Image: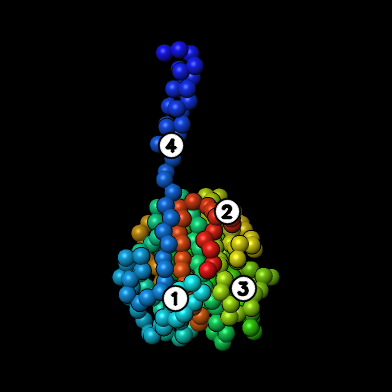
Amino acid sequence: MNLKACKIFAVLLIVIGSSFGQKQSKSTTWTIDNLEKIAGQQVTVSGHPQIIDAPGGKAIAFDGVGDSLLLNENPLAGAEAFTLEAVFRPGAGGAKEQRWFHVQEDNSENRVLLETRLVDNEWFLDTYIKSGENNRALFAENFKHPVGAWYHVAIVFDGKEMRHYVDGVLEMSGPLIIKPFAAGKTSIGVRMNRVYWFKGAVQKARFTSHALLPTEFMKKN
């Protein structure tokens, strides 16, 4: 083997070794358009959520009083970094505080929350991550949006920092160190302990096991 071939072979070994040393990123999309199964998971339904028309398909509407969906799945389990995205439509006339997407580890308080706060006919995003003694809330009261429209929201955690976005625009960020989550459950439409009900609609969610850039977010419609 000549010198040039040896160099090429050495580079290939480095590239292959690096690839094996990296964890493969996973991405899972939940299309929230029915009351039976989401991404192959059986859904437990509370109340009477409705299937409605939405841009590009269907969505589930929640009444803000007793409607919710529960899945026996933590789509963020095991991820050292992650992006949680959702497309939703906050409705008028709901409670001031609403917890509408809640992922929580079993037998633990470790969790990720997408929340809204209503101020008259506007809303703002409140996000929260907790793991052990470490936690961070991003309370975006200076970034209000009209209710009644469809929005894309995202929590991005890169292993050192938590950020959240609305329609691809960064609103808040802060440092955070957490351990990967274990298996758990996901509640849509209410907090896991059935308080702070959501009035509005949710169409889809995506879970990616690395920190996405805004240009990599899923499309709203």
Which residue is pictured at 55% across the width and 78% down the height? 90
Instruction: For marks 4 and 1, give the one nearer the viewer.
Output: 1
Residue that badge 1 annotates = 58
Nearest the eye: 120 or 89? 89
Residue linked to disc 3: 124
| Mark linked to residue 19 | 4
* Mark found first going from the N terminus, 4 or 1: 4
Mark 4 or 3 closer to N-term?
Answer: 4
* Residue 180 visible, this angle: no
Q: Are marks 2 and 3 in contact (CB under 8 Å)?
A: no
Where residue 4 appears, as percent x and y from the top left, is 49, 16
> The residue under label 4 is which amino acid type?
Ser
Q: Residue furthest front?
A: 56
Q: Who comes first in sequence, dot 1 or dot 2?
A: 1
Which residue is identified by label 2?
213
Q: Residue furthest top?
A: 2
Q: In the image, which is nearer the foreground, mark 1 or mark 2?
A: 1
Residue placed at 39% from the left, 56% from the top?
77
- Along the polypeptide, which appears first: circle 2 or circle 4? 4
In the structure shown, which secondary structural element does the residue marked by tag 3 occupy? strand
Element assignment for label 2: loop
Where residue 95 appears, as percent x and y from the top left, is: 54, 83
Say which of 126 and 53 sits in front. Answer: 53
Furthest residue in direction right, as rendered: 142
